[in-house]
Image (tube, grey):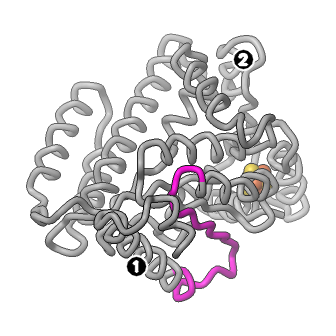
């Protein structure tokens, strides 16, 4: 079974130990294992004698209101207006945190004091954790912007820019990807993460024209390399790699759990994208046995290679695509 499934089970057990009686789980359908997650997890919890009710959020077929029906047992009799207002507030809060993470992923590459960005993140988490309404949220955002502006930046040439694509859970969860963004940032590399939690919510739970247009654009970008949906985020990985290739990033890192079927399909076409756009692409596979030392060594080698390639391309010795073939 793939890694996110196992981590979820661990999360559920921890939550149950801390007194939770219900879990809300993202559902899904398609040619990979995600569609089996909730059902299998429910069985496992039952076998373990853990009494957790599981509410599964399947992508709505007709209207977003279908989600309301699933979440109804959690509302404690609150009015629809109050529930919608609170969900909206949670979404805006999530967006604010994602915006901060996005800024930190780039800022970490030029911070003067090691761990200055991590300190901002910890402080911001504490501040956002106290927020209970919109006006307080706006004030906190100002406070956090202040904190960000106080981070001393190195006055250097442009840092390397690396895009992070792949299976969503490994992309967004630092404890699963062994704090990949932090490691790259500490090596002076700015990270462009391809997806955030709020992106997933707006694309899958809140039907909106912008998300539909973006999805269509991704499919168009991926079409020369991969024509159909392959489950999970395989198609997105290909489409986003093409977009990052067009943006001339210095490198792309694909991350995935061991045996993730959609990402294995995407991985098989990434070398072609690498050649077409002259961008180095590395794949990192994670499971519960992944070691930090091995990851660090591979990252250092990849970053060294990108530095050499950038210098070579700058001197005009070879074109971008040949530089990739050479290294
Ligand atoms: S996308 Fe990959 S990791 Fe996620 S459920 Fe499917 S096979 Fe497992």
Residue 39 visible to the viewer: yes
- Which residue is at the front of the view, 276 or 158? 276
Is residue 55 in the magenta section? no
Farthest-out residue, bottom: 293
Q: Name the residue rendered at 76%, 41% in the picture.
A: 226
Q: Name the residue rendered at 66%, 59% in the picture.
A: 271
Question: Toward which corner of the image does residue 264 lie, by quadrant?
Answer: bottom right
Is residue 286 in the magenta section? yes
In the picture, measured across the screen, residue 50 lies left or right of residue 242, that is right
Q: Name the residue rendered at 29%, 67% in the picture.
A: 315
In the picture, measured across the screen, residue 291 lies left or right of residue 258, that is left
The residue under label 2 is: 66
Around disc 2, counting alpha carbons within 10 Å, would you say few (fewer than 14), some (14 to 19), or many (20 or more)? some
Residue 202 higher or lower than 190, as above or below: above
Question: Toward which corner of the image does residue 311 lie, by quadrant?
Answer: bottom left
| Residue 304 circle label | 1
């Amino acid at each position: 079974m793939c890694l996110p499934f196992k981590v979820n089970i661990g999360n559920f057990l921890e939550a149950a130990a801390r007194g939770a009686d219900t879990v809300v789980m993202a559902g899904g359908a398609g040619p990979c294992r995600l569609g089996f997650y909730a059902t299998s997890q429910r069985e496992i919890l039952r076998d373990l004698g853990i009494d957790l009710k599981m509410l599964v959020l399947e992508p709505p077929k007709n209207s977003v209101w279908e989600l309301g029906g699933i979440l109804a047992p959690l509302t404690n009799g609150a009015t629809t207006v109050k529930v919608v207002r609170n969900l909206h507030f949670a979404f805006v809060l999530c967006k604010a945190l994602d915006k901060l993470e996005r800024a930190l992923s780039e800022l970490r590459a030029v911070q003067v004091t090691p761990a200055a960005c991590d300190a901002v993140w910890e402080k911001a988490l504490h501040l956002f954790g106290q927020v209970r309404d919109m006006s307080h949220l706006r004030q906190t955002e100002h406070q956090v912007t202040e904190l960000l502006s106080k981070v001393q930046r190195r006055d250097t040439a442009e840092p390397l820019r690396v895009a992070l694509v792949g299976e969503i859970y490994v992309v967004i969860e630092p404890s699963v990807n062994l704090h990949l963004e932090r490691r790259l940032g500490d090596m002076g590399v700015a990270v462009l993460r391809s997806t955030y939690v709020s992106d997933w919510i707006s694309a899958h739970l809140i039907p909106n024209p912008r998300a539909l247009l973006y999805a269509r654009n991704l499919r168009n970008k991926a079409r020369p390399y991969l024509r159909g949906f392959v489950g999970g985020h395989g198609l997105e990985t290909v489409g986003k790699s093409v977009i990052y290739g067009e943006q001339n990033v210095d490198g792309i890192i694909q991350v995935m759990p061991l045996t993730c079927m959609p990402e294995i399909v995407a991985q098989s076409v990434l070398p072609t994208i690498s050649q077409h756009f002259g961008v180095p692409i590395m794949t990192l596979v994670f499971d519960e046995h992944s070691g930090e030392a091995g990851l660090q060594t591979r990252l250092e080698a990849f970053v060294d290679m990108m530095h050499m390639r950038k210098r070579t391309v700058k001197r005009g010795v070879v074109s971008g695509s040949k530089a990739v073939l050479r290294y």
